Image (cartoon, rainbow, N blue to C red):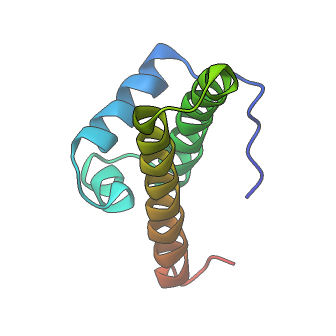
Amino acid sequence: MKIDFSKPLSDQQKEKVQKVLDAQGDPIQTAIQMNENPDDIYVWTMQELEEERQSLNAKAKEGMTPELMHGINRLFEKETSLRKAWEDWKKEQPNRK
């Protein structure tokens, strides 16, 4: 799925992403429980994480710190977990490719 990172998220989209991230579980299952489209939540969350990545990259140019490295690693873990949950969910859907 192609994600357009140039279009900023609305406040409502950011709020939904934050609720999903705050739930601390499978983001796709959380989206379903919230009656949200998992595809939308996936795209919006990836956009939110990309914003965070850009901020961390800007800070890294000033100098790498242990805290910054931890933030980068945490962001990578979030992205990997989200991507896997979404891909697993897609495979379970009978009419999806």
In the rendered view, tell whether residue 44 sits above or below residue 74.
above
Residue 5 at x, y percent in the picture = 73, 33
Q: Is residue 30 left or right of residue 39?
A: left
In the rendered view, tell whether residue 85 sits above or below residue 27.
below
State the residue at coordinates (39%, 59%): 28
State the residue at coordinates (60%, 34%): 53
Which residue is most to the top?
11
The C terminus sits in image quarter: bottom right
> Residue 29's image quarter?
bottom left
State the residue at coordinates (50%, 70%): 84
In the rendered view, tell whether residue 4 sits above or below residue 25.
above
Front-lying residue, 35 or 56: 56
> Residue 66's image quarter?
top left
Residue 23 at x, y percent in the picture = 21, 46
Residue 39 at x, y percent in the picture = 55, 53
State the residue at coordinates (57%, 44%): 46
Q: Is residue 39 left or right of residue 8?
A: left
Front-lying residue, 23 or 32: 23
Q: How many marks?
A: 0
Residue 16 at x, y percent in the picture = 37, 32
The N terminus sits in image quarter: bottom right
In the rendered view, tell whether residue 31 sits above or below residue 10.
below
Q: Is residue 21 left or right of residue 52?
A: left
